[in-house]
């Protein structure tokens, strides 16, 4: 039996909970609704930060079929911090090259990770049920994470100090109270409807068929996209390799296609034979027809109820921006909620979640809408523009930048975030305030490693000790105090290969290839303040305790002055 059918038959048992028999609704600090990749990531992150969390899901099994399969480098880096990234990469198919065809001819080839020196690949292809399984297994190991299957939220009543939820289970209904509710319950979000909220955007009048097939094939692990291929004229086709000799093929069908007829094997097989040849041998694993929309809620935060993932925003599948942006929502939210719950930050920190992720959703919707308009033009002029661009792309670089088979997911840069401290100097490279911290190879205690592995979920102050001199005594003292303060920042000293240690009491990494200093445009005495979600908060050419304190207070929405500044 293949992995798909094993996963489809796997069930997670419902277990009666004392909350269901309590005379008064039990109170929980955080309740996450929806155990898909986004809800699991959020719950796992909170639990690993010491926050007790209840995770409710109405089902008792993993997703069926491949669904979201393209997980981006940034998502893998987030999952690395949560202890599941390596397993995802080991199971998945790594890739970074995409090829675009017009008819039978290749018109463009692109590389999503053209430079070396990164710990994770540009993308992996991994069926969503595998990703969910790895996340569920990690969740079940967390003592602070209470995962409850077959627990459907049927009512949500916001209150000043949280929300009351009605939960339906096989043994009946019960109520519970949550200080905070994270709604990760998907694109049809019942919780969103319970609050009377509706997303706004565009619904695209087109249909696509997904066919997961198992076969032996010589195709490389690349993304292949055809416009108007001879085997499916007038439409588009996308091919991806998945683990376990499984391949994902997406066929554009047009709006008038009958979804029920389209998934019948006698209608799917001719499409696949046209692509693969009459002699091709394959097994149909899963088929589905989808339509899509690009839309989002007006606001992601509604008092103590916060929306993430498809519940908050939705995009077309072209560009792999759905699940990836949802996981990044969870990454952005968990550390902020932790600090608010600990009393270290005001609720304005949670407002920054909405500010940053609503802007990220707008960016994703813009890219996704443009890709869909290019793939599925609805006027003769649009079709003429697309085909002209594709023909010119064979020979002209300027036209290749206009080819849009889906701009692949990249992490949002929070340039306008209220948490950023503006630069006071000019810098080269991409590590600006609001951007994700770039990775690079480093050496830690004599062993090879990666820079992002040193960013452990706290604020991190990276101090570049690129010369031979030790740290001055007063600088060393306040850095040690900052490092020891749980509300402060972990201090990591960066030194070049062959240089003596700057301070043996503080964590140190060796920039063995010089890529870290290059990517961060840093020299002796410079520093970066990096947030718990690995986005840059501030940077300086020279260390200054007051500047660091002010930037940290701004990025953390701190409620009081930290002890280390006294």
Image (cartoon, grey):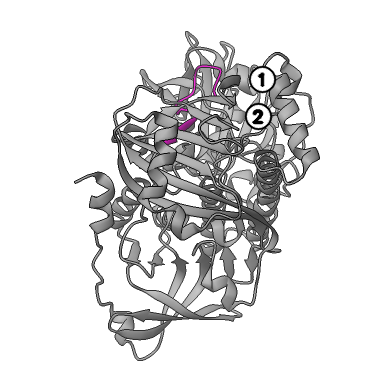
Secondary structure under badge 1?
loop
Mark toward the viewer: 1 or 2: 2
The percent position of residue 267, horizontal first and vertical second, equals 41, 48
406, above or below 541, in the image = below
The percent position of residue 408, horizontal first and vertical second, equals 59, 35
Q: Residue at x 24, y 58 (%)?
A: 9
Return the residue nearer the eye: 47 or 253: 253
Secondary structure under badge 2?
loop
- Left or right side of 359 for 28: left
Q: Is residue 430 magenta?
A: no
From this viewpoint, which residue is outermost toward the top? 498
The residue tagged 2 is 431
Q: Are marks 1 and 2 in contact (CB under 8 Å)?
A: yes
**Span colored in magenta:** 112-125
Taken as a whole, is the magenta stretch helix, strand or loop?
loop
Point out the tag, 1 or 2, that comes first from the N-terminus.
2
Residue 503, visible in the rendered structure: yes
Residue 455, visible in the rendered structure: no
88, above or below 280, in the image = below
Q: Is residue 116 magenta?
A: yes
The percent position of residue 534, horizontal first and vertical second, equals 55, 39
The residue tagged 1 is 521
């Amino acid at each position: 039996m293949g992995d798909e059918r094993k996963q489809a038959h796997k069930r997670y048992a419902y277990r009666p909970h004392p909350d269901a028999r309590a005379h008064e609704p039990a109170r929980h600090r955080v309740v996450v609704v929806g155990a898909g990749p986004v809800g699991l990531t959020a719950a796992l992150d909170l639990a690993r930060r010491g926050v007790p969390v209840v995770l409710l899901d109405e089902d008792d099994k993993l997703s069926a079929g491949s669904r979201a399969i393209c997980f981006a480098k940034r998502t893998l880096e987030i999952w690395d911090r949560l202890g599941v990234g390596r397993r995802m990469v080991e199971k998945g198919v790594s890739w970074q090259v995409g090829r675009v065809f017009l008819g039978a001819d290749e018109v463009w080839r692109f590389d999503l990770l053209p430079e070396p020196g990164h710990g994770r690949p540009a993308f992996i292809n991994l069926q969503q049920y595998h990703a969910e399984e790895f996340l569920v297994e990690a969740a079940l190991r967390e003592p602070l994470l209470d995962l409850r299957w077959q627990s459907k939220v049927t009512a949500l009543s916001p209150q000043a100090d949280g929300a009351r939820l009605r939960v339906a289970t096989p043994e009946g209904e019960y109520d519970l109270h949550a200080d905070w509710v994270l709604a990760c319950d998907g694109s049809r979000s019942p919780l969103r409807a319970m609050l009377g909220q509706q997303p706004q955007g565009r619904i695209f009048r087109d249909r696509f068929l997904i066919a997961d097939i198992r076969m032996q094939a010589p195709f490389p692990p690349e993304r292949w996209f055809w416009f108007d291929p001879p085997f499916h004229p007038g439409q588009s086709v996308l091919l991806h390799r998945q683990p376990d000799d499984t391949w994902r093929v997406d066929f554009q069908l047009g709006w008038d296609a009958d979804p029920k007829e389209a998934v019948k094997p006698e209608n799917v097989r001719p499409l696949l034979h046209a692509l693969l040849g009459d002699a091709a041998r394959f097994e149909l694993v899963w088929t589905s027809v989808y339509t899509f929309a690009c839309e989002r809620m007006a606001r992601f935060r509604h008092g103590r109820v916060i929306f993430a993932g498809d519940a908050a925003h939705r995009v077309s599948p072209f560009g792999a921006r759905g699940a990836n942006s949802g996981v990044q929502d969870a990454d952005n939210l968990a550390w902020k909620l932790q600090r608010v719950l600990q009393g270290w930050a005001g609720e304005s920190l949670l407002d920054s979640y909405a500010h940053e992720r609503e802007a990220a959703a707008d960016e994703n919707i813009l890219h996704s809408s443009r890709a869909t308009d290019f793939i599925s033009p609805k006027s003769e002029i649009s079709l003429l523009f697309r085909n002209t661009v594709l023909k010119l792309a064979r020979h002209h670089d300027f036209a290749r930048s206009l080819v849009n088979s889906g701009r692949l997911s990249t992490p949002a840069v929070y340039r306008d975030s209220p948490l950023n401290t503006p630069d006071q100097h000019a810098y080269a490279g991409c590590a600006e305030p609001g951007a994700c911290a770039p990775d690079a190879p480093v050496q830690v205690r004599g062993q090879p490693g990666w820079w992002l592995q040193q960013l452990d979920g706290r604020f991190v102050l990276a101090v570049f000790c690129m010369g031979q001199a030790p740290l001055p005594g007063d600088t060393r003292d306040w850095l040690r105090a900052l490092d020891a303060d749980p509300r402060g920042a972990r201090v990591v000293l960066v030194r070049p290969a062959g240089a003596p240690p700057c301070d043996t009491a503080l964590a140190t990494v060796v920039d063995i290839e010089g890529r870290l200093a290059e990517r961060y445009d840093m020299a002796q005495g410079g520093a970066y303040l990096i947030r718990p979600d690995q986005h840059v908060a501030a940077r300086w050419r020279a260390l200054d305790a007051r500047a660091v304190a002010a930037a940290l207070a701004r990025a953390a929405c701190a409620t009081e002055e930290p002890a280390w500044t006294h």
